Image (cartoon, grey):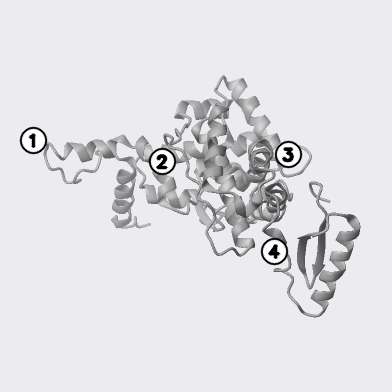
């Protein structure tokens, strides 16, 4: 029984089927299970058995089924936790008795107005609307309805502020940490890896020869196992000399790189509490592990690293996500504006910032490569 509804949960030919019983009782569920098993045995499909009854299913019933069958399967632990809270706290109480396919755009606007009256910020309201929109879109897909799901129009809100640590704050954070937590903080600041990627980092992902790390795994708290990264892609990140030497000192062949005192992979809850403790000791504002990822990207942008390079290092699927760091590279914009002044000399760098450390390093590497090798 799930949320006062009886469900049939069976496996056939290595495939799982979960169907809501048309008769909401234990006896009805057992009878429905027998019918489904007979159909499967005869080679008949059962995916469309509930299409008619699904259309009259209440939003509450469908929402929890969507959470169990879609969210728990496709989303990360943090997204699962957030969507469960949003469903239980606001969406289901408002749409509880609505048949899913009868929810209109006007109903959604009324829901939006109710959240505004509660004093929620536009950003929080948009987060709730995002969960509702995805749930309804999935419902229309599963029910194979010919019409499109009702439009969910988000509220206007300013773009989120990207907070990051200064170089001095980074040093303060590392100075007030120790052991494996210090190692994980250093790795986050110098590689920009996500928390799950750091938790799931394996020794066989360290490429010792070229001093790279192959990011291909992420530790999932809910499943307590390794999954693919958020973008479902692999990426290579060069290791900073400090991170490389830190890892080399305790080099292993296989297994997790970072383990807690009990020899187990860290959980999100434990890492969050550890970081909070370090911040308090260092006298810093409370930050999240994702803030360290912002710090990595912001420092690269400030030093003139092209945003498409930052995108590759972070593993962003689109450049639009990386563009949030463009504002921290004011020297690039200053050079562009200076070109408009007719009295500004045309330097050989054609408007590129003179102090661009990235360009300077690239030119230095090219120059060194052209030097003749020293004879022994």
> Label 2 vs label 1: CA separation?
32 Å
| Count of number-bearing discs | 4
Q: Which residue is mark 3?
A: 260
User: Where does the image place residue 101, in percent across and percent down from the top left?
Assistant: 61, 55
- Name the outermost residue toward the bottom: 42
- Name the outermost residue toward the left: 343
The quadrant in which residue 158 appears is top left
The earlier-in-sequence mark between 1 and 4 is 4
Specify few, some or many for label 4: CA neighbours under 10 Å numbering under 14, 14-19, or 20 or more: few
Which quadrant is home to the C terminus?
Answer: bottom left
What residue lies at 84% left-to-right and 70% top-to-bottom? 35
What residue lies at 15% left-to-right and 43% top-to-bottom? 347
Depth order, front residue of 372/1: 1
Depth order, front residue of 109/141: 109
Depth order, front residue of 327/102: 102
User: Where does the image place residue 47, in percent across and percent down from the top left?
Assistant: 71, 68
Q: Is residue 6 left or right of residue 130?
A: right
> Label 1 vs label 4: CA separation?
74 Å
Q: Which residue is mark 4?
A: 52
Disc number at residue 324?
2
The earlier-in-sequence mark between 2 and 1 is 2
Q: Is residue 126 left or right of residue 342?
A: right
Q: Tell me if residue 42 comes above or below residue 149 in the rendering.
A: below
**SS type, badge 1:** loop
Q: Nearer the viewer, mark 4 or mark 3?
A: 4
Q: Which residue is mark 1?
A: 343
**SS type, badge 3:** loop
Residue 46 visible here: yes
Q: Nearer the viewer, mark 4 or mark 2?
A: 4
> Label 4 vs label 3: CA separation?
51 Å
> Label 1 vs label 3: CA separation?
61 Å
């Amino acid at each position: 029984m799930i949320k006062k509804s009886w469900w049939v949960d069976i496996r056939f030919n290595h495939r799982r089927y979960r169907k809501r019983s048309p008769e909401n009782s234990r006896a009805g569920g057992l009878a429905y299970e027998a019918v489904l098993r007979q159909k499967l045995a005869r080679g008949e499909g059962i995916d469309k058995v509930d299409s008619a009854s699904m259309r009259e299913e209440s939003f509450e019933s469908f929402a929890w089924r969507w959470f169990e069958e879609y969210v728990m399967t496709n989303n990360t632990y943090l997204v699962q936790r957030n969507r469960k809270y949003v469903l239980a706290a606001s969406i289901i109480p408002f749409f509880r008795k609505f048949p899913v396919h009868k929810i209109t755009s006007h109903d959604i606007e009324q829901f939006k107005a109710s959240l505004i009256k509660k004093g929620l910020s536009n950003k929080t309201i948009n987060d709730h609307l995002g969960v509702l929109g995805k749930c309804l879109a999935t419902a229309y897909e599963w029910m194979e309805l010919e019409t499109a799901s009702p439009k969910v129009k988000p509220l206007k809100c300013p773009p989120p502020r990207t907070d990051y640590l200064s170089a001095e704050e980074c040093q303060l954070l590392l100075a007030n940490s120790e052991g494996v937590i210090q190692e994980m903080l250093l790795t986050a600041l110098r590689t920009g890896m996500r928390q799950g990627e750091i938790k799931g980092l394996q020794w066989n992902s360290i490429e010792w020869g070229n001093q790279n790390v192959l990011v291909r795994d992420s530790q999932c708290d809910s499943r307590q196992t390794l999954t693919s990264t958020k973008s479902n892609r692999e990426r290579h990140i060069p290791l900073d000399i400090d991170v490389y030497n830190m890892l080399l000192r305790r080099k292993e062949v296989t297994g997790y790189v970072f383990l807690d005192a009990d020899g187990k992979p860290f959980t999100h809850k434990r890492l969050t509490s550890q970081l909070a403790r370090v911040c308090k000791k260092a006298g810093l504002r409370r930050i999240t592990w994702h803030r360290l990822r912002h710090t990595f990207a912001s420092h690269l942008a400030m030093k003139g690293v092209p945003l498409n390079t930052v995108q590759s290092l972070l593993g962003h699927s689109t450049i639009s996500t990386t563009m949030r760091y463009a504002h921290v590279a004011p020297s690039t914009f200053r050079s562009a504006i200076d070109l408009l002044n007719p009295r500004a000399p045309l330097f050989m760098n054609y408007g590129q910032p003179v102090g661009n450390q990235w360009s300077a390093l690239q030119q230095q590497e090219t120059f060194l490569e052209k030097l003749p090798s020293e004879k022994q």
